[in-house]
């Protein structure tokens, strides 16, 4: 449980990068294998807590070897089933400038395999479980070709904030969205994929604080509006233009009554 708690804590952070996913998952798999499975005929270490339990109750390793092995393998399979797209998510890491190679000679082939992976997923038509055709999102050939140039724009920015750097590129290089349209689509997908559950937990926390037993008749529509304001509103209420907000609301009300 200690190992699984470490994994849970990772995904409760405010920000989890695409590079972090594979790193942490591989580490967890390796720890579970080393402590509870072992494929080299040697006895697993069993971890501190299980070792103490075995000592306290005089349990020999051969008495629980198969059970622990099967249980640990089931845990690994369960984690993998929850992260079926981990390899796909890992490919999105190429859009983070912090991971760009320092050497100019290595930049030319950087992201080649990852773009291929993203092309295989987003660049072809797919059929869902109900037989509906899901049209491709990008032109994969164009994305692969344009990425060869787009990464040099990213290299010029190189910041600590992946969201901020792409916001800067989109705002400063106004033709980027058109010239690198397919690369931009992949970037936007990477920016909206939620890897951390911190925001979700924050929503539930605000939900509990907002819809109390005194407000038990609050409608879902009103609750939704409250949560949007609480989670996305400005922290600096003194600088908020309340008159502008009121005038906008009055205009909307006037139009709805026409």
Image (cartoon, rainbow, N blue to C red):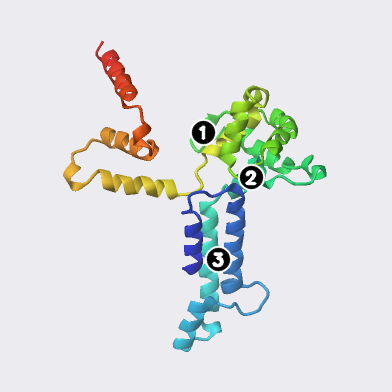
Describe residue 7's horizontal placement relative to residue 231 as left or right. Answer: right
Q: Nearer the viewer, residue 140 or 236?
A: 236
The residues bearing labels 3 and 2 have C-alpha atoms spaced at a distance of 28 Å
Residue 36 image point, x, y percent:
56, 73
Residue that extends furthest to the top in the rendered view of this protein: 258
Residue that extends furthest to the right in the rendered view of this protein: 105
Of the two numbered discs 3 and 1 on the same chain, state the one appearing first in sequence. 3
Q: Secondary structure at mark 2?
A: helix
Residue drawn at point x = 28 percent, y = 48 percent: 208
Task: From the image, tell me which residue sits under label 3.
Answer: 73
Task: From the image, tell me which residue sits under label 1.
Answer: 131
Residue drawn at point x = 62 percent, y = 23 percent: 174
The residues bearing labels 3 and 1 have C-alpha atoms spaced at a distance of 33 Å
Give the label, 2 or 1, closer to the camera.
2
Whether residue 6 is situated above or below residue 62 in the rendered picture: above
Residue 148 image point, x, y percent:
75, 34
Residue drawn at point x = 50 percent, y = 63 percent: 6
Q: Which mark is residue 93?
A: 2
Of the two numbered discs 2 and 1 on the same chain, state the one appearing first in sequence. 2
Give the label, 3 or 1, closer to the camera.
3
Residue drawn at point x = 32 percent, y = 45 percent: 206
Whether residue 46 is situated above or below residue 142 in the rendered picture: below
Within-10-Å neighbours for mark 1: few <14, some 14–19, many 20+? few
Q: Nearer the viewer, residue 26 or 198?
A: 198
Describe residue 42's horizontal placement relative to residue 65 as left or right. Answer: right
Quarter of the rendering occupied by the C terminus = top left
């Amino acid at each position: 449980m200690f190992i699984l708690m470490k994994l849970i804590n990772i995904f409760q952070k405010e920000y989890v990068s695409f590079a972090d996913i594979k790193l942490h998952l591989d580490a967890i798999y390796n720890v579970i294998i080393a402590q509870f499975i072992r494929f080299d005929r040697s006895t697993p270490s069993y971890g501190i807590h299980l070792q103490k339990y075995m000592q306290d109750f005089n349990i020999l390793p051969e008495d629980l070897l198969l059970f622990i092995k099967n249980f640990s393998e089931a845990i690994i399979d369960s984690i993998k089933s929850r992260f079926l797209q981990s390899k796909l998510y890992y490919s999105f890491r190429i859009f983070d400038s912090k991971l760009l190679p320092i050497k100019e000679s290595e930049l030319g082939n950087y992201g080649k395999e990852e773009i291929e992976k993203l092309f295989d997923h987003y660049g072809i038509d797919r059929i869902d479980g109900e037989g509906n055709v899901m049209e491709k999102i990008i032109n994969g050939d164009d994305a692969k070709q344009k990425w060869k140039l787009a990464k040099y724009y990213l290299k010029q920015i190189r910041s600590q904030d992946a969201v901020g750097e792409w916001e800067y590129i989109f705002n400063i290089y106004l033709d980027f969205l058109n010239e690198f349209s397919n690369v931009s689509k992949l970037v936007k997908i990477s920016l909206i994929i939620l890897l951390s559950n911190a925001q979700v937990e924050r929503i539930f926390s605000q939900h509990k604080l907002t819809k109390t037993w005194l407000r038990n008749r609050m409608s879902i529509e009103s609750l939704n509006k409250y949560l949007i304001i609480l989670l996305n509103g400005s922290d600096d209420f003194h600088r908020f233009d309340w008159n502008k907000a009121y005038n906008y609301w009055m205009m909307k009300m006037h139009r709805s009554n026409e």
